[in-house]
Every structure is written in C-alpha cells, then in structure tokens.
Image (cartoon, rainbow, N blue to C red):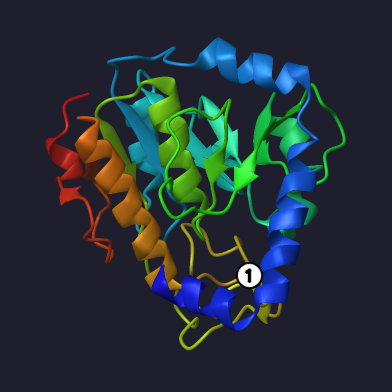
Amino acid sequence: MFSRIIRNIKSPVKLIKKVYKSRQNAKRLSQSDLDYWASIKDIHKGKRGFVIGNGPSLRVSDLDKLANDVSIASNKIYLAFDDTIWRPDYLTIADPLVWDKVRESVREHFPRVLIPSYLERDDSELEIYWKSKYMGIIERFSGDLGRCAYSGQTVTFENLQLAVHLGLNPIFIIGCDHNYAGEKNITAGIAIKQGSEKTHFTSNYRKPGEKVLPASILDMEASYREARKYCDKNKVKIFNATRGGQLEIFQRIDFDSIRF
C-alpha cells in the first residue's frame, strides 16, 4: 500500500492520468452491466464459497470436490477442464495481457466472463463489466460490485469482493501460493519475460519467453489486509485452505478437513 502511495507522490502527473482514465473507463458500463450486478447481489447469501487461485499448489483433483459449492475462478482455469468435470460458477479476468491472449478461448468454455471496465470487450452479453477503481484513502474494498471493485495487484482481491457481493460466508481460498518463482526485484505493472519456472498449476500455463505482468507481493499483501479488515468488520469469514504457499494474512485451514 505504502509503496503505491510513494509512487503516486513521486509521479503526480501519472496519478492524474490514472484517475482521468479510470473515470473515462467507468462510463463504459451499460445498464445491462448494472442490472447483472443487481440480479446477483446476495444471491448466495449465507452459503460457503471457494475462491480459486491458479498456483502450483492447486490440485485438479480437489476441484471435483467443489461440485456442490459456489466457486469463483479466473484467467486460464479452463486448462484444467480436460481433467475435471467441475466448472466454476463465475470466471473473472483482470490482467490486460492475459485478456488479450484468452479472450477468444474463453468463449469456448464460458457463457459469461466478468472483467474490469479498463479492458476492451467484444460482446456485451458474454462480457460483464465491473467499474474498476483505485483504492481510496477511506474506501479500499467493495461489497457491492454494482458500485465498483477496487484493484489490488491480483485478481484474487477482486474475486474476494465478488464473493462478498454474492453473499458468500464463509469464503475459502485455495491455490493461492502467494509466491511467483523468478519474479524477485520486479516493478509492478512492467511486463517481463516468463522464465522456465513453474508458476501455476500446469506447466503449459505460461510459455518461456512469454510476456507477463508480474505483481508486487507487498502490494498484494496490503490488498489482502484490506479484504480481511473489511470482512472482519462485517463478520464474513475468510479461510486460506491453500496447500502450502506463503499467504498468511487469513486464518489457515486444512483443505482435507473441510467436509464435502
């Protein structure tokens, strides 16, 4: 959080441009987008749900256990579909580079994909916009995606906001290793070339040499703290059921201890 504040103080012109662009992108939302968010507000109130990360710890065999639960996934999760009958209830994509690579592929697997208002969309029936905002001084987490979702350097942060919007409680996170091999000393938002390290649940998720947007672990942790702060205040439980990994912001729970 503080690193982002310092960057903005050092570059006030860039900050002004960001704010202006964010406001312009917000105008892209249509009435059908707002109607969609209204239609699913608290639709799963009181039910438990799973937010799925795509880290190396994610076992595809675990996904089949989620058949009777609400689940939120992102990006290239469809690479697991050959090995599981499970399908997520909601799919999100927020990374511009990922979106450019998969926007055609997702049509083959999903009837709908949820994306932030800064991405280009081709089909307003397939692609639903949420209004993307930078974190403010006071508001940093949204429980109503009909109003906005705050960016947090990882789509998992937006997915937690979506989970709260849906009324899910408790929320279990799996596959969130919170560690990206080969991405030390990076600058958030600046594309790098993927190395040979395995960074996701399948080896073909990224190709060596592929351009990817790295994320700052410190910035992500700041975002996760905001999620926990909001959910603690609103009595929403978040548990980290990831098999290993380095995310310690949320209370840990053993995935195998969850009853299905």
Question: According to the image, label 1 marks what residue?
Answer: 213
Asked where in the image residue 61 lies, by quadrant, the reply is top left
Q: Position of residue 252 (x, y in %)?
A: 15, 50
Work out whether 1 lies above or below 80.
below
Please indicate whether residue 28 sits to the left or right of residue 226 in the image.
Answer: right
Q: Position of residue 72 (x, y in %)?
A: 47, 34
Q: Is residue 239 visible?
A: yes
Q: Secondary structure at mark 1?
A: loop
Callout 1, which amino acid? Leu
Quarter the N terminus occupies: bottom left
The structure residue drawn at horizontal position 38% and vertical position 29%, both measured from the top left corner, is 164
Q: Position of residue 181 (x, y in %)?
A: 44, 78
Query: Which residue is more in the foreground, 52 or 229?
Result: 229
Q: Is residue 83 visible?
A: no
Query: Which residue is more in the foreground, 153 or 150?
Result: 150
Asked where in the image residue 48 lies, by quadrant, the reply is top left
Work out whether 30 lies above or below 183.
above
Quarter the C terminus occupies: top left
The structure residue drawn at horizontal position 24% and vertical position 29%, both measured from the top left corner, is 170
